[in-house]
Image: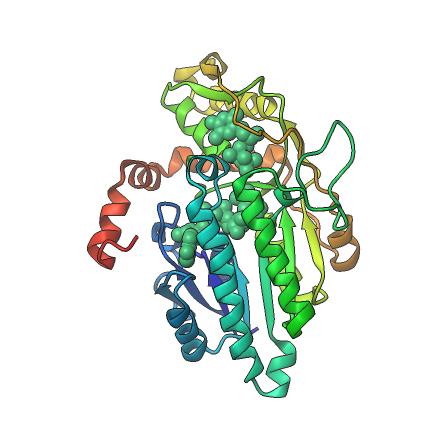
Amino acid sequence: MNKILITGGAGFIGSAVIRQLIAETATSVVNVDKLTYAGNLQSLVSVADNPRYCFEHVDICDAAEVARLFREHQPDAVMHLAAESHVDRSISGPAAFIETNIIGTYTLLAAAREYWSGLPAERKTAFRFQHISTDEVYGSLGETGFFTEETPYQPNSPYSASKASSDHLVRAWHHTYGLPVLTTNCSNNYGPFHFPEKLIPLVILNAANGKPLPIYGKGDNIRDWLYVDDHARALRLVLEKGRTGETYNIGGWNEKTNLEVVHAICAILDELHPQGAPHASLITYVQDRPGHDRRYAIDANKIARELGWKPQETFTTGLRKTVEWYLANTDWVKAVVSGEYQKWISTHYGGKG
Ligand code: NAD
Ligand code: TYD
């Protein structure tokens, strides 16, 4: 691929994909991001001056701007990661999720189709629209079993319902208009540059600062964790080699209860940051999330069998790297948490962030 248009590239996973593409390939990247509270250009400092990287401050719901992007940049592929991504925020304020995840995806699909229809034959055949989604569309598992690509959709939160809607739109654009799409559904990611509202970065930072570690319910809900750079590698592989119209589940065979995750973080911190030990004494049980999905677990056999993907990190190695990163990158954390970064966005982008 010569040039990829990446939406949501200033977010957690999108920035990992961009850093990899710039470091490991000759591909050019157009990062399209609205810079919401979750978008952070400081995660892209290492690539910002690279001639193969460019940033477009655009809301994917803005049809005229999205059409301009395709016209001006003439990409060979789209990797669509822009989304509202936090379940708790979707419960207290679902409107932004409907707007960005559903209307935004529709707007992008419509513009991509218009652009793709006008491409010369060879570029038209090679074009790809990759939609990055979540395993949460499948709903919640009981004690046994795994989500496969054939599991019926049963989204339970406003977040997962909005992502499920976007998956269906992408599927329909392939089935009806022939747009060459690929969809991936991944389990929970963790790693550096993760906004500290999600469980793992929140617990690392609270524990390091002697603050309570909030556990919803009994802490026995299960998530299937994948290191973000492994997800980024999987996405690149699906884009290059995946069969159009297909869905690929991505996961690391790494099921943990939330309590297991929190204890693992505390154990690493007891070693690396002994002044607060034992950090597990900060665990605090709080009211459960409404409609809290019980268990997620991905069957990642299809992507392993068809594309030869497997994760490089184990939970042990990935979690240690993550804790070390948060302890070493206090400036990034401080800017994100203090709101300093949002002030910077208003100065540079006229308060649109
Ligand atoms: P994130 O919240 O860290 O980043 C989302 C990015 O999208 C931000 O940079 C934000 O500014 C941008 N954005 C939001 N609304 C926009 C709009 N209207 N126009 C343009 N940009 C906009 O999210 P993430 O964790 O990096 O997730 C990326 C994608 O991967 C999402 O689609 C999410 O559903 C999916 N996903 C995430 C996980 C996970 O564990 N984080 C797991 C599976 C799938
Ligand atoms: P989260 O990181 O929000 O991801 P998701 O809801 O998309 O799986 O939450 C991961 C798990 O951790 C989930 O079961 C909810 C739980 N959780 C807590 O117990 N306390 C917290 O403060 C947060 C943010 C999450």
How many numbered circles does the render carry? 0
Left or right: residue 247 versus residue 270 is right
Q: Quadrant of the N terminus?
A: bottom right
Whether residue 229 is visible, yes or no, is: no
Colouring = rainbow
Whether residue 174 is visible, yes or no, is: yes
Give x and y (percent) for residue 216: 52, 22
The residue lying furthest to the bottom in this view is 120
Residue depicted at x 58% and y 29%: 292
Residue depicted at x 47% and y 34%: 88
Residue in front for this viewpoint, 216 or 263: 216
Q: Is residue 255 above or below residue 234?
A: above
- Quarter residue 209 falls in: top left
Residue in front for this viewpoint, 108 or 306: 108
Q: Is residue 245 above or below residue 209?
A: below
Give x and y (percent) for residue 231: 60, 50
Give x and y (percent) for residue 222: 64, 29
Left or right: residue 41 versus residue 252 is left
